[in-house]
Image (cartoon, helix red, strand yellow):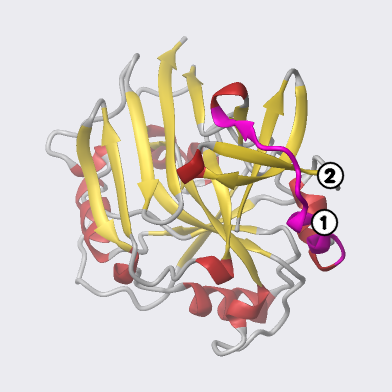
């Protein structure tokens, strides 16, 4: 099952998404995805309705989750080749090993839609990062590796837009990762039982040029590991969003770096989930 949030004649709805058929079907329970996630056991019986089909071209897809309930939890340098290019950009040594996961927070007041324009006013080193995004379905504390997936609601695609100069300036990542609007997400949430995330291609393109091309099988720390570790420290609340890190091929990884420019178009896609497209405007 694929869930979307969309706009139809100026009104927001939640719906089921049938991409191959080019339609959506409204869900008459709420227009707030967080509410649906938290109350899914109560609401799921309404998802199997016989609602009328609406052609996709007549609606506007929005980010599945509009306002995250908390800061997004992100994984840093969670693909080995990206760890190497990150160290090279920062002029740091790298021994080819990653012993511990790197976690950081990303402030997102509102997620950008899957077809949107990001307006940059803050950085000259704007970068893109395609990422697998995990959404927690129920409160999770002290999960084991074996039970961790029981707490997952579903998956979507994210673009962790980053300001590399701000990351270096502040010697930490929070400001450089948290520019207003810097998290396009979508186009849908695929429920966990409908997708095996262990072997999916993950790619990004800039102006049609393939930049990132990897596979989720190359994650250093996988989803069960991350959920088990994080939930040993604190409760992962229902609706929590975890962005699992990006592969190599980001702008800072080139020599010289190839940061985003005014008018660029970034496409991020993950097999089995879909694609999001983000235009860039330097205001």
Residue 61 at x, y percent in the picture: 59, 32
Q: Report if the CB atoms under discs 1 and 2 are less than 8 Å apart.
A: yes
Q: Mark 2 — residue?
A: 28
Residue identifier under label 1? 46
Residue at 64% x, 79% y is 150
**Is the residue marked by circle 2 packed among few (<14), some (14-19), or many (20+) residues within 10 Å?**
some
**What's drawn in magenta, residue-wise?**
42-56
- Left or right position of 268 against 237: left
Q: Is residue 80 above or below residue 269?
A: below
Q: Which mark is residue 125?
A: none
Question: In this rendering, does residue 104 appear at all?
Answer: yes
| Quadrant assignment, res 26 | top right
The correct choice, above or below, for 173 with respect to 101 in the image is: above
Residue plotted at (76% across, 35% down): 13
Badge 1 element: helix
Relative image position of residue 27 (x, y in whole percent): 77, 45
Give whichever of 21, 145 is nearer the camera.
21
Q: Is residue 108 above or below residue 86?
A: above
Q: Cα distance, mark 1 to mark 2?
A: 7 Å
Q: Is residue 44 magenta?
A: yes
* Residue appearing at x 21%, y 65% in the figure: 94
**Residue 40 higher or lower than 208, as above or below:** below
- Quadrant position of residue 197: bottom left
Which of 194/128 is in front?
194
Residue at 57%, 79% (x, y): give it. 229
Few, some or many C-alpha atoms within 10 Å of disc 1 (few <14, some 14-19, many ≥20)? Answer: few
Instruction: Answer with mark 1 or mark 2, whichever residue precedes in sequence.
Output: 2
């Amino acid at each position: 099952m694929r869930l979307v949030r969309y706009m139809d004649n100026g009104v927001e709805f939640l719906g089921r998404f049938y991409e191959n058929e080019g339609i959506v079907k409204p869900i008459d329970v709420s227009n707030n995805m967080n509410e649906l996630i938290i109350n899914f056991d109560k609401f799921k019986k309404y998802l199997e309705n016989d609602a009328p089909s609406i052609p996709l071209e007549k609606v506007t897809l929005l980010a599945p989750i509009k306002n995250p309930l908390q800061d997004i939890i992100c994984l840093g340098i969670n693909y080995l080749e990206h760890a190497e290019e990150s160290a090279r950009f920062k002029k740091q040594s790298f021994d080819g090993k990653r012993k511990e996961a790197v976690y950081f927070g990303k402030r997102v007041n509102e997620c950008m839609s899957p077809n949107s324009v990001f307006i940059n006013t803050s950085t000259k080193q704007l970068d893109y990062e395609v990422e697998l995004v995990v959404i927690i379905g129920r409160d999770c504390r002290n999960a084991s590796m074996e039970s961790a997936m029981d707490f997952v609601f579903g998956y979507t695609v994210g673009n962790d837009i980053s300001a590399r100069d701000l990351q270096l300036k502040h010697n930490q990542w929070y400001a450089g990762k948290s520019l207003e609007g810097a998290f396009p997400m979508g186009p849908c949430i695929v429920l966990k039982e409908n997708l095996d995330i262990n072997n999916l291609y993950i790619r990004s393109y800039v102006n049609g040029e393939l930049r990132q091309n990897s596979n989720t099988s190359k994650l250093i720390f996988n989803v069960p590991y991350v959920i088990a570790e994080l939930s040993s420290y604190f409760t992962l609340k229902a609706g929590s969003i975890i962005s699992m890190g990006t592969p190599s091929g980001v702008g800072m990884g080139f020599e010289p770096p190839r940061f985003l420019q005014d008018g660029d178009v970034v496409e991020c896609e993950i097999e089995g989930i879909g694609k999001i497209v983000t235009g860039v405007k330097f205001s």
